[in-house]
Amino acid sequence: MSHHIIEVKDLQYTYPDGTPALRGVSFLLTHGETVALVGANGAGKSTLLLHLNGCLIPQAGMVRIGDFPLTRKTLPHVRRTVGMVFQDPDDQLFMPVVYDDVAFGPLNLGLPQEDVEERVMNALSIVGATHLKDRPPYRLSGGEKRSVAIASVLSMAPSILVMDEPTASLDPKARRQLIHLLKTFTHTIIIATHDLDMVLDLCARTIVLKEGQVLADGPTWEILQNEELLDSGHLEKPLRLQGCPRCGGERECP
Amino acid sequence: MSHHIIEVKDLQYTYPDGTPALRGVSFLLTHGETVALVGANGAGKSTLLLHLNGCLIPQAGMVRIGDFPLTRKTLPHVRRTVGMVFQDPDDQLFMPVVYDDVAFGPLNLGLPQEDVEERVMNALSIVGATHLKDRPPYRLSGGEKRSVAIASVLSMAPSILVMDEPTASLDPKARRQLIHLLKTFTHTIIIATHDLDMVLDLCARTIVLKEGQVLADGPTWEILQNEELLDSGHLEKPLRLQGCPRCGGERECP
Amino acid sequence: MANIESSFLDVSYLDTLSYQTTIIHRLDPRIKLITTLFFIATVLSFGKYEIAGLIPFVIYPVVLIALGNLPIAYLLKKVLVAAPFAFFVGIFNPLMDRAVLVQLGPLELSGGWVSFASIMIRFILTVTAALILIASTGFNSVCMALEKMGAPKSLAVQLLLLYRYLFVLGDEASRLTRARSLRTFESRGLGFKVFTNMIGQLLLRTLDRAKRVHLAMRCRGFDGEIRVSRPLKIGGRDLGFMLGWSGLFVLMRLYPIPQWMGGMVAELLK
Amino acid sequence: MHMADALISPTVGGAMWVVTAGLTAYSAGKLKENIDDSRVPLMGVLGAFIFAAQMINFSIPGTGSSGHLGGGMILAILLGPHAAFLTMASILTVQALFFADGGLLALGCNIFNLGFFPCFLAYPFIYRKIVGERPTPRRILVGSLVAAILGLQMGAFGVVLETLFSGISELPFGAFLLLMQPIHLAIGVVEGLVTAAVVTFVWKARPEIMETAIAPRAIKAFSMRKVLGGLLVITVLTGGVLSWFASTNPDGLEWSMFRTSGKEELEAPQKGVHALLAALQEKIAFLPDYSFRKSAKEEPEKAGEAQTRGKSTKEESWPAVSVGTSLSGLIGGLMTLIIAGFIGFGLRKYQGRKR
Ligand SMILES: Nc1ncnc2c1ncn2[C@@H]1O[C@H](COP(=O)(O)OP(=O)(O)OP(=O)(O)O)[C@@H](O)[C@H]1O
Ligand SMILES: Nc1ncnc2c1ncn2[C@@H]1O[C@H](COP(=O)(O)OP(=O)(O)OP(=O)(O)O)[C@@H](O)[C@H]1O
Ligand SMILES: [Mg+2]
Ligand SMILES: [Mg+2]
C-alpha cells in the first residue's frame, strides 16, 4: 500500500526571521516502519515533522505522502493520511469535554453520527481512556492528557502517525504504558524524541538530525552503539546500555 | 550551619478548586544534602516545592527554613535562602535580556551596582553562559535557557537550591552537562524529577511522594531497587538498572 | 490585522534587525525617539494641499535606512500592508473636493486629488519613520527610553513584559491553531463555539503562566518595582544627530526647497 | 479602526497625547495605590495574550470573513479599569511600532478611542451595572454585548471627531459617521459575543479567578467623576492653548496658497527685515489651523480674502495656481527625490565598504 509511504527529498526550510532549520533532508519511510528522529535541541526535528502533515509547505525540495507530493492542493488528503500528536497535549485538546475532542476530527470529516460515535469509543478504548470521556481535558493528569491526545488523532483513522516528544514530562509508569500502547500499533510511525531508551524499545530504524541535515540513518541498534556518531549528534548511549552507576562496569551483550 | 536546614512537618495543602495536593508531608533535610523528590504525575511534587520558598503558605502543618518557620513575616529571609528553578525556564526569564534577568534578584536585594555586576558575571560563568549575556531569552535554546535560569537563581547566592524537573526536554548531552554542573554545587539541593537515572547520579537520598503523602524516604540506592515500592509509586527502576533490551539479561551488580 | 501570524514573524524580524551595530543603532534610544517624533510632527504640520514641501523629508528615512543597513524593500512592503485605512479615508477627498487646484497644461488636478496624494505621502513618511525607529533601536530600548523620559514605570514594565511573552504566547496560539487546522476539513470546525473554547483554553493557560511568572519574580525579591541597571548616556554624537536633523526639518519646513530648485532649473532652461 | 498619522493634524494628535498621558499617569497612580504586585506580570502576560488570541480566528457563517478578539472589554473584566487601560495602551503602542497600525502621533487618539471608552465608561457604567455582584451566564452575555457595542460605538465616534477636527480628510461629518458607526456595530456584536463566551468559559472552569478579578476593585462612582472632571479640564486647557496658538497663524487658505506658489515665498524675504521677521514668525508657529477651517470660514473678512484671491465658484473651491509655478514645484520635487536616492545609495555603498 503505497499510501503509507513518506518520502522526503532534499527538504529545506528557513524560518522567516532567517533561522535555517532544515538544510536538505532526504529519507524514505515505507509501510509499517516505526522510525525515531533524534538529535540535539534545535536540530530541526519539530520543523521536519511539521512538513510531514503540511503544517509547513516545503520551501525547496519535496515531501511525498503516499502517491501524492505535498502541495496546497493535496493538503486535505495528506492531513487525512497523517495524524500528528503534539508535544504538549494542551495544544491539542481544546474542546470542553474529552468526548467532543475525540469526535472533533471525525465530525469535520462529515461522517454520520453513528460512525462518529463508534470511532470515538473505539479510539478511546485503544488508549484505555473510555472512562474519561465526560471529563474536561484541562482537569486530566499528564499521562491521561497524552492518551486522549493520541485518541483524538486515532479517531481520524490516519495511516501514518507523527509524534513529537511523546514521553516528555510523563512519570516512568505512564511512559511505560505509552510505549506498550505504541508497540501495539501497526501504523507507520515517526517519533521525534530525546528518549533514546524508548527508541531502543520501539523503533527498528533511527534517523539522526544535526543542524538541519541527516547525520545518520540506519538500524537503531547500530546507531545507538556508535559513540562517535552519538557524540557528534549531541546524544549519548541509551541509559540501559551505559555502565552501571554503582560498579561502573560496562554491560556486555552477548 | 542550621540555616541550610529544611524541615517540613505535616504539611497540607488543598487548591482553591478543592483538589487536595498535599495531605500531611513531613521530612527533614540537613546541610549539604542532595535529595530527589519523585512520584507519579500529580503526586504533589511541584506543590511541595512551592512551599519551600514561600510561594505557597502552609494551610496546615509547618515549614521551617534554617531557624525560621515560614510565615509571611519571614518570607523575605526565606526567599533569600532558598533559590527556586522553575520547570519552564520561560516562566523564570521574564526580563528583556539575559543580563537583566540574572541581575534582577541582586538589584532587588538592594546591592550596589558593582556588586550586582560581579554577582551576575560570576553566576553566568558558573553555568558557562557568559557569552549569552546580551541575548534576549526567547532566542535561546532549551539547554541555554535552563542554564541561564539557574544562573538567575545563583546570582542571589542562595544556600538552598530547589529545582522542578530540570532535565525535562533537554537533549541527552545538555542533560549530561546539567548533571555535571549540579554535581559541582555544594548547596543543599532538592530536585523534583521523573528522571531516575539522574537521581542515581546526583542524589544520595530520595523521597517518594504518592497522592500528597510520603510513601518512602531513604537512601536512593535502596529505594530504587525496591520494585514493589517503585510500582506503587508509579515509578520503575532507573533505566541503567534495567535488563538489557537486546539480550534481556538482568544487570548483576557485585 | 488580517494575518496576525505573519505579523508575529515581522516582529521577530524587526527585532533581529535591531541587533546590528551601525552608527544609527548605537545612538541613544531617547535621541532617536525624540527625533522621530519631531520628524512626524513637522511632516504633519504641512497644509493639506502640500506635496512639494513634503518631498525633501524623504531624506531622513533614506539616510537612516542606508546608514542603519535596513532592508528597504521589506520596509516598503510593510508600509504597503498598513496602507488601507489611510487610503480608504483619504480616497474620499477626490470625491468631495473637486475644485481645480492645479493646472498642468490641459491636465486639471482637483484639490481632492492633491490632498489625497499629500495624505499618502504623509502616510509613507510617518510610518517609515516609526518602523525605522523600531528596526534601529529595538523594542526594549524604546521602552527604556520611554521610562527615562518620564512615562509611568508601570507602563514601561508592561511593555517589556508584553513584548517578552508575545513570543511565548504567540507560539502557544499558533500551535493551537495548527492543531485545529489539522482536524478541520473544508473549513468545517472553524465555528464560533470551537473558537471560544480555544480562546478560553489559551486564557486559562495564560493566567496560569502569569501566576508562575509572578511566583518566579517574587522568589527573586520582587516587591512591585522592576529595577533595571542599564545606564543610558547621551553623548555629543547623539546631540549632534538630534540637533542636526531637527534643524534640517525646520529648514525644510520653512523653505520650499523643491520650488527653489525647480525655479532654478526653469531659469536655466529659459 | 486605528486612526492613522496621515489623517490627523499635530494639534489634534498633540491634544490627544496630552489627554492620554494624563489618563496613563492617573491609572498608574491608581495602580500603585492598590499595591498588588501580582497584577504587574498579569497585565503584561495578558497583553501578550490579546495578541496571541488574535491569531486564532473563526469563520463568520455566510460572510466568508473571519472574526477575532479585540480585547478592551475582556481586559477590563479581568483586570479592572486602571490596569486594563494601561495594558490597552501598551498593546496599542506595540501595534503602532511594529505593525504600523496607527502611528506614533495618532497613538494618543488610538489609546483614547480603544482604551478609555471600554475601560472607563463601558466597563464600569454598563458591564458592571448589568452583571452586578453575582454573575450568571445570561448577565455576562448581556453585559458584555451591550458594553462592547457601546464601547466601540464611542470609539468609532471618537475616530470621526478626531478626523473631522484634523481637517485632513474631506469626508463630511455625516457621511463618515454613517460609514463608521454601522461597521462598528457589527464589530461590536462580535466582540461582545466573544467576550461573553470567553468570560463564561473561565468563570465556569475556574470560578476563583473571576472572583479575584471582579471582587476587590469595584471602582467607585466618585473616583470616576474625578477622572471625567480632570479629563474635561485637560481637554479645555489644551484645546484653548492650542487653538490660541493656531489662531495666531494666517488663515489656512492663505497659507496653503503661499506654500504651493514658490514665487511669493521667494519674494517674501526680499521685502526687508520687517517682512522677513513677520514671515518667520508665521512659520515658526507651525501648527496649521486648517483643522479649524470651518470656523475660519465663518469669519467674513478671511473668507472674503479667499474670494478675492481665487475665482471661487463654491465655498470648497480653491485658487488655481499658474502652470509655471506648479511645474517648477513638480520638477523640484522630482529632483529632490533623485538627490535623496543618490545620497542613500552613496551612504549604503560607503557603509558596505567599511564592513
Ligand atoms: N517559529 C520559529 N521562528 C524562528 N526560528 C525557529 C522557530 N521555530 C524553531 N526555530 C529555530 O529552528 C531551529 C530548529 O528548531 P526545531 O524546533 O525544529 O528543533 P528541534 O529539533 O525540535 O529541537 P527540540 O529538541 O528543542 O525540540 C532552531 O534553531 C530553532 O531556534
Ligand atoms: N493551580 C491548581 N489548581 C488546582 N489544582 C491543581 C493546581 N496545580 C496542581 N493541581 C493539582 O494538584 C495535584 C498535585 O499537582 P502537582 O503539580 O504538585 O503534581 P506534580 O507531582 O508536580 O506532577 P507532575 O509530575 O505532573 O509535575 C494534582 O492533582 C494537580 O491536578
Ligand atoms: Mg522540538
Ligand atoms: Mg510538577
Image (cartoon, coloured by chain):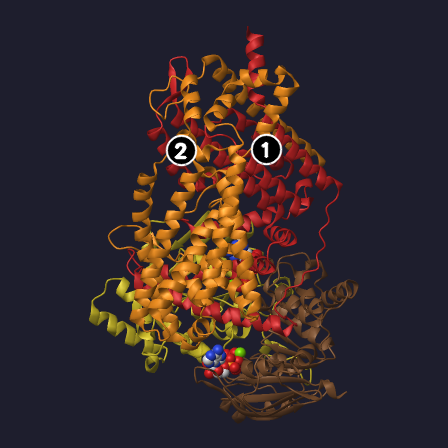
Chain colours: A yellow, B brown, C red, D orange
Q: Is residue B169 above or below residue C75?
A: below
Q: Using the image as rendered, state which of residue C72 and residue C252 is in the foreground.
A: C252
Chain of the residue where label 2 is placed in the rendered structure = D
Q: Residue D96 location in percent, x, y?
A: 50, 47
For mark 2, does the 10 Å Cα neighbourhood hold few (<14), some (14 to 19), or many (20 or more) residues?
Answer: few
Ligand 1 neighbours mark 2 (CB distance < 8 Å)? no
- Relative to C204, say whether D283 is above or below: above
Can residue A34 be seen in this snapshot? no
Identify which residue is drawn at 42% across, 66% down.
D77
Q: Which residue is mark 1?
A: C62
Q: Chain of mark 1?
A: C
Q: Residue at x 64, y 59 (%)?
A: B97
* Closest to the observer, D192 or A26: D192
Q: Which residue carries the number 2 mark?
A: D294
Q: Residue D286 occupies which quadrant of the picture?
A: top right
**Mark 1 belongs to which amino acid?**
Val
Label 2 secondary element:
helix
- Left or right: D275 in relation to D326: right
Q: Is residue D225 left or right of residue C144?
A: left
Can you give x and y, in whole percent of width and height, for residue A178 in the image?
Answer: 44, 77
